[in-house]
Amino acid sequence: MKSTFSILSEDNPGVLMRIAGLIYRRGYNIESLSVGRTNKPGISRFTIVIEGEESVYEQICKQLEKLIEVVEVRNLTKEGPFVERWLTLIKVHAPLEMRPHVLQTAEIFRSRVVDLGADAITLEVTGDRGKLQACIEALKPYGIIETAASGQVALSRSGFMQTGTE
């Protein structure tokens, strides 16, 4: 089972290696890792997706919390609904005669054109993992030249959540 962790930590050299090393040493593969600064100066948010046994996730959380620079660790998958986004850049073969078809396909997925050349278009696609995979599959017949993808970023949902009372 996959689990998404949100980790707040101080911006110190080596924090990424300590966090990734802790997970690696327990025999788990990091499927996705994204890091970025938060609205609080000196604090970064790590979003990490790990696939493994659910029973070990609580232990990973506790061990991550022991790292000096770590401020907070949350298992978003366990806590409830969360919002996730992935970003992919896709360079597609698009000579003039095929360009309207490529752009029409891109429109279906609400992609943005970020670069335009004589024979190719580079698209930016954001969404959940399923949307990105579907977009790639839809563009394959035109000829994908190359892709680049980010890791997952995620935050817990706020508002309109059920409290469990009926």
Image: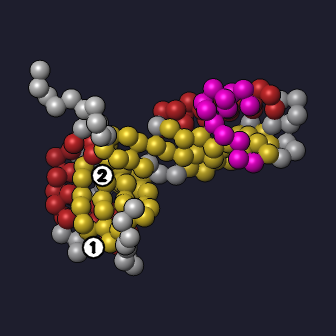
Residue 9, picture quadrant? bottom left
Whether 147 is drawn above or below 7: the answer is: above
> Can residue 136 be spotted in the picture?
yes
Residue 135 as seen in the image, left or right of residue 102 = left
Q: Is residue 149 magenta?
A: no
Residue found at x 23% / y 75%:
68
Residue found at x 28% / y 31%:
160
Q: Say what amino acid the circle numbered 1 marks.
A: Glu
Residue 162 as seen in the image, left or right of residue 120 = left
Looking at the image, is mark 1 or mark 2 earlier in the sequence? Answer: 2
Q: Toward the viewer: 123 or 149?
A: 123
Q: Position of residue 38 (x, y in %)?
A: 39, 62
Q: How far apart, in angstroms, are the residues tagged by discs 1 and 2?
A: 16 Å
Whether 66 is drawn above or below 116: the answer is: below
Q: Which residue is mark 2?
A: 5
Q: Position of residue 62 (x, y in %)?
A: 16, 60
Q: Quadrant of the C terminus?
A: top left
Furthest residue in direction left, as rendered: 165
Residue found at x 25% / y 32%:
161
Q: Residues within 10 Å of mark 2 (few under 14, many from 20)?
A: many
> Can residue 1 be spotted in the picture?
no
Residue found at x 37% / y 59%:
46
Q: Which residues are magenta?
A: 103-115
Residue 41 as seen in the image, left or right of residue 112 = left
Whether 161 is drawn above or below 61: the answer is: above
Dot 2 falls on a residue whose secondary structure is strand
Q: Which residue is mark 1?
A: 69
Whether 163 is drawn above or below 83: the answer is: above
Residue 80, picture quadrant? top left
Q: Position of residue 43 (x, y in %)?
A: 35, 68
